[in-house]
Structure formats: structure tokens, C-alpha cells
Image (cartoon, rainbow, N blue to C red):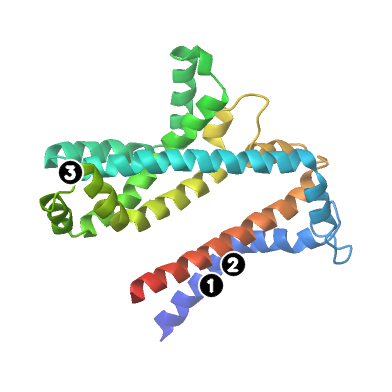
Amino acid sequence: MVKKIITRLFLTLTLLFVYTPIFVLVFFSFTDTTIIGQWNGFSFALYGKLFSDAHIMGIVRDTIILALVASLISTVLGTAGAIGIFYSKKRAAAVMNTVNNIPVINAEIVTALSLALTFALVMTFMNKSLASLLIGHVVITAPFVILSVMPKLKQMDHNIYEAALDLGATPTKALFSVVIPEILPGMLSGFMLSVTLSLDDYIVTAFTKPETFDTISTYVYNAVKVPVHSALPGLRALSAIIFAVIILVVILMNIYKKKETKK
């Protein structure tokens, strides 16, 4: 009994430590004040300022487009890579799995610096361009797609694929008719994870983006460096919206998983 109480207390304190700053940020997004801690009455003024700021809205749009494009590319490459690794010989598969895990466990600053040096030395025309930014986001997200798809490949009944070939289907048709539907949940999970990583990334973005381009993370960082930045109050509203969207996505994904489990 005592052990259970201590465990729950520790869990509660940990959750409070993690989420209290977020809840404070969300709470003060509903008051028109430039200082967190000062309450000027309930108001949606900051949300109005946020949506009326064309510059910030443009940055949000560009960030979302970048995340979606990078995630789509990562999903295609990661799915192809996972299938290739799975059907390779054991020794080759082990080597490729190890190589795939390196970007996952590697320090992001090392990856960012390596990409920046590569673009600067090898591909001068792509140095700090939209292309280098997109490639950088694909590099950090594709390995996670492979990690999401591999378990689904292991769970799949491979006799179905063999049966499709025996019934006259070409390998390509069997791939899209049998394998892809079986691993689709893993592909969707990898895509959502890639979108989250891309939206959240700062280090790789800062090292590979052109000077005239900003994402939400780089814009917020630059705004926070200036204590009197005019956009800081509006960024509280933006943070609250991002948090609410993430909560909604998590809830929907849990509902989807429960339905799949019941099936």
C-alpha cells in the first residue's frame, strides 16, 4: 500500500513538473498582457493578434508545408527501406538496421553540422537552400519511419504474399495489394511521427535553412532572444493552439488504436 502511494505521488509530481509550465503558458494566452504572471482579465485578444499577423501566419503555413512534404518523402523512403531490410539476408539486415539506428541515437547537433558541411563542400548550389532544408528534415525523420514499419512487417502473415504470387500476381501487384495494406498502420504512425519531428526541429533547421526562411521553432527562438520582442505575447496563443492540436491528435490516435484492437 505504501509503495503504491509513493509510486503514484512520484508520478503525479513528475507530471506536474512536466506540464505545469505548459498549462501556465496556455492560461496566460487568454489575457492581453505582455508579462506572464499579470492578469488583465479574460480575453481572446492574443489569438486575434496572432491570426491577424500575416508574417506569423506565413511562417506557420511554411512550417506545415515543409513538415508534410518531408514526411511524405520520409514515409516513402522509410517504407521502401524497411521492406528492403526485412527481406534481406540476416547479416545484411543487421548491418542496415545498425546504420539506420545511428541517426536516431546520434546527437542532433552532430547530424546538423555534418549536413551543413556536406552541403557547403559537396553541393555548393544547395548550401542553405530550401532543398538542403528539406533533405535535412528527411534525414532526421526517415529512420523513424523504418522503426515504425518494421514491427508491422514482422507481424504480417507472409504466406499471403506467397499465395498472391502463386495466384499469378506480379511482385509489384502483390506488394501494393498485400504487403502495403498490412503495414499501413505502421506507415501512418511513421508519417505522424515524422510530422511531429519536423515541426519540432530547431537544430537541423537552423543549420540548413536559407537566411530568408523561418519555421516556427527558429522564429520563436529568435523572438525569445529579444525580451521586448513584439511577437512574444502572440506566441503564447500559438503555443496553446499547437498544444491543443497535439492533444486532439493523440486522443484520435488512441481511439483508432482501440478500434483496431477490438477488430
Q: Secondary structure at mark 1?
A: helix
Q: Quadrant of residue 230?
A: top right
Name the residue carrying label 2. 16
The amino acid at mark 1 is: Thr
**Distance between the alpha carbons at the discs numbered 1 and 2:** 6 Å
Q: Residue at x 51, y 66 (%)?
A: 252
Q: Is residue 177 left or right of residue 234?
A: left
Please, what is the three-letter code of the amino acid marked with disc 3?
A: Tyr
Q: Is residue 14 left or right of residue 122?
A: right
Identify the residue position indicated by label 1 in the image: 12
- Residue appearing at x 73%, y 43% in the figure: 57
CB atoms at circles 1 and 2 under 8 Å apart?
Answer: yes
* Residue, far left: 166
Callout 2 touching callout 3 (CB < 8 Å)? no
Q: Whole-percent x and y of residue 65?
A: 58, 40
What residue sits 47% from the left and 71% below the top?
255
What residue is at 16 percent from the left and 40 percent from the top? 88
Quadrant (top left, top right, bottom left, bottom right) of the C terminus:
bottom left
**Residue, disc 3:** 87
In-front residue for pair 38/136: 136
Of badges 2 and 3, nearer the viewer stands 3
Q: Secondary structure at mark 2?
A: helix
Q: Earlier in the sequence, mark 3 or mark 1?
A: 1
Which of the labelled discs sits on residue 122, or is there none?
none
Give the spatial CA distance, label 3 vs label 1.
45 Å
The amino acid at mark 2 is Leu
